[in-house]
Image (cartoon, helix red, strand yellow):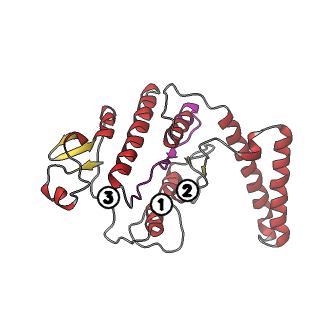
Amino acid sequence: MLAPVGHGRYHDARPTVALAGKEVEDWGDGWGLHKSLAQLQQFGLAALHGVGTHEPDLSHFEMTARWQAGTPRALGPAGTGFLGRLSDQLAGDELLTAVSLDLGQNPALISDRSRTSGLAIDGGLGILEVGSEETQRRVARAFNALAESLLSSGTVGSESAAEVRRATGAGLDGMLAIATLLRTLPDPETEFPETDFGTQLRLASQLLRSDSGFRIIHIPMNGGSFDTHDNHRDQHNQNMTLLGDGLAAFGAELAALGM
């Protein structure tokens, strides 16, 4: 992304994949920005070097879990995620403090007090997508039945019955409110790339336009992979093009929003 093209050790260590010449935009002091990211400089761009840990683990799963938890060392029992803890500090009375635009709840958003959720990038919500009154009644009955089954099975104690019923109602209200919000999102002014990442960024811009109180929008970059076991140069160039084109459109949309 930002390569030390002016340093001989870089080329010695990476003789087949090192960037050089027209592949980079000169950033001064021996650094070169990947050519596909040069378009982002118009929005203001900064780089942070040396991100990582002095205690790495060769397990993809362990290292991914550390990034999501926000800890440089081996994990103990599962806890909150780094964005979840930030959400706890930012939370107000908004419907959701943080969302992850991906399938399911991302572990980085696991919080202690605030409301966070995952939103599928296609906006699909299964039975909630229909949104009719009858559908809402069926969902309500299903939620209530689940709560009652938890109570009758002894999974939760009777002293928690009121809290279970309250949480059930709040959860249902929240789901229906999100379904309504997603059906009424305003369109962006900017044309986004027709890629998975472009779709994620388009939805993020729509959520911002809705002015619905989201404080954190987490976007894991779908459509690219940095786990390049082979053909590294071509795959990395594709990733940079995906990233650069997507963020350029997103930057233009933020500018249109005055953000």
Q: Is residue 25 left or right of residue 205?
A: left
Gap in Å between the C-alphas at discs 3 and 1? 14 Å
The answer, for residue 259, to whether it is visible in the render is: no
Q: Residue at x 81, y 43 (%)?
A: 136
Q: Which residue is mark 3?
A: 51
- Confirm or deny contact between disc 1 and disc 2 (CB under 8 A): yes
Disc 2 is placed on an element classified as loop
Q: Is residue 97 above or below residue 132?
A: below
Find disc 2 in the rendering and name its residue.
106
Amino acid at pointer 1: Gln
How much space separates mark 2 and mark 3, taking CA atoms? 21 Å
Q: Is residue 77 magenta?
A: no
Q: Which residue is mark 1?
A: 68
Magenta stretch: give its range: 207-228
Q: Nearer the viewer, residue 151 or 195?
A: 195
**Measured from the top left, where is residue 77 in percent x and y?**
53, 73
Secondary structure under the numbered disc 3 in the rendered image: loop
